[in-house]
Image: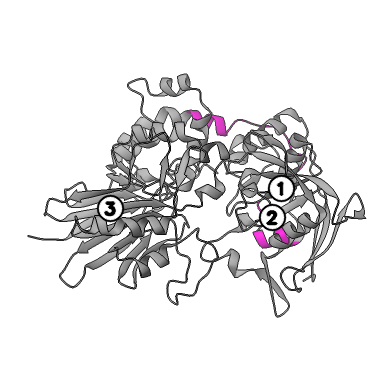
Amino acid sequence: MNRTFHIRYTSDIHGHFFPTDYATTEPKNIGLMRLMSEYPHDKNTLILDGGDSLQGSALTNFYERLSEDEKHLLFPDGFLHPVSAIMNMAGYQYVTLGNHDFNYGLKELNTYLQHLNAVCLCANIVDKAGKLPIQPYAIHTLENGLRIGLVGVCTHYVRVWEKPETLQQLQIRDAFETARDLYPEVRSQCDFTILLYHGGYECDLNTGVRLSNGSENQAYEMCTALDYDLVLTGHQHIAMPGQFIHDTYTVQPPFRAQGVCAIDVTPGTEGAAFTSTILPADHEPDPKAMAFLKPLEERIQHWLDFPAGHLESPLPYVPHLTAALHGSLVANFINTVQLALSGAQISTCALPNEYKGFSEHPTIRDIVSTYIYSNTLVVLEITGAGLKQYIERSSEYFDFDNGVINYSPEFMRPKVQHYNYDYFSGIDYVIDVSKPIGSRVLSIQYDGREIKPEETFSLCINSYRHSGAGEYSMLPDLPVLKDIQEDVADAIIEYILSHPEVHIDRHRYSTILPVT
């Protein structure tokens, strides 16, 4: 009997089902509907997903804003969570959870999982109440008789990033340790093992040189220290069609359903043979899925085109290095909103890896395509010394070599992290990137005077940065003055709507030396 079997694997769909990124109305080669029409549905094929399905697009952003009654009215013939419905139509059999799947809370996550036909495998994160339909592993027998053991784990950095009220309901173990401990039990029951891991590679795949500190990503160690036959990764949004690391084969698909990993596996007595590629999202969208979500999509497009207000000038996209060196009007504007809402003395924000910017007459589309995160705000008390430490960490974004300022490799590999460079408003500060890391901040002034190490300030930051994400370890333990449970994108919308003429803060708060 032919022992070959097939896999279709996606990860980090981030709510992208239609062929659009919602920044414009132009169709793109993107979205699960363009992939699913080509999925095989025979009994020797596994259709798998690596998590981060629920958050990250205008579709899921809008859906979460609806009341329960509005949600049910959109699907009068029998309510299904829209993400679950499309995943079901695509034939997914097993999924794991991504860190962003927790962003809307456990109630929404439970609704998604209860409506999902696929089995959710996530061994290292469980809810204490036992309500989420999650299991640690599964043994799947194919038509050709092969028994496939599948284990699911998610990066345990969920406990760093997620909201405290959600974390209180979860038990979270180290992903590597969990995968290691489960392996013997699973191996004894199957012919072939798959680790479905929402996490990425911490090392250069060719040299093995470690690229990042911490344990957010552990896939390289999993491939070298554990004995799984296949490790399916995600989280980093890096397309990697497949290669061996040690004796383990591993892949990573692109994000936003821009492609699907197609893997053929033939187990043998001396190991399995693999062929794999990434199939692009260039097929016609699945008509059944399009029809099912059409009522929701029509409401979203109407909402996105709603005029929000008027800015005194447009705030276009600027390349990240240019913005970091010379200041960002988009960042200034976000900080303006955060300062108005919080009443803090200082505000910080970051820019996404990809963002649209604002037109002079911004629409909701501009806003949700520029501030794409599901963040709330917190006001902290920080000393002058703590503020210097904060800016020092942000200044590590810059690399200085032979008189040229560029991005630090730390912020570009193994994944691009422009969102971990912060822009400050309310203080004037000078960074000299020719200085050693840790001693780059030359000056911090508040209200025209140099700040003192012992004096305190109120600082508004988003919930992601408050968690310490991005190696900002100086922030999580600071005293909390105010917790603002309002989505930042909502706050931006409300600010523009309530200000007939929005003034743009053009002040350049940072000075980056040496001037190039």
- At mark 1, the secondary structure is loop
Tell which of 209 and 7 is nearer to you. Answer: 209
The relative height of residue 263 versus residue 458 in the rendered view (above or below) is below
Q: Are marks 2 and 1 in contact (CB under 8 Å)?
A: yes
Q: CA distance from mark 2 to mark 3?
A: 39 Å
Return the residue at label 2.
474
Q: Are marks 3 and 1 in contact (CB under 8 Å)?
A: no
Which mark lies nearer to you, 3 or 1? 1
Return the x and y of residue 160 as percentages of the image width and height.
Answer: 55, 50
Tell which of 238 and 114 is nearer to you. Answer: 114
Q: Amino acid at mark 3?
A: Leu
Return the residue at label 3.
150
Residue 377 highlighted magenta (yes or no): no
Q: CA distance from mark 3 to mark 1?
A: 41 Å
**Magenta residues, start to end:** 299-325
Q: Of the numbered discs in the image, which one, if any, rests on residue 478? A: 1
Residue 48 vs residue 170: left or right? left
Residue 246 vs residue 201: left or right? left
Return the x and y of residue 449 as percentages of the image width and height.
Answer: 92, 54
The relative height of residue 459 versus residue 516 in the rendered view (above or below) is above
Q: Earlier in the sequence, mark 2 or mark 3?
A: 3
The relative height of residue 277 versus residue 350 in the rendered view (above or below) is below
Q: Amino acid at mark 1?
A: Leu
Q: Earlier in the sequence, mark 3 or mark 1?
A: 3
Q: Residues within 10 Å of mark 3 (few under 14, many from 20)?
A: many
- Quarter holding residue 264: bottom left
Residue 398 vs residue 452: left or right? left
Residue 97 vs residue 471: left or right? left
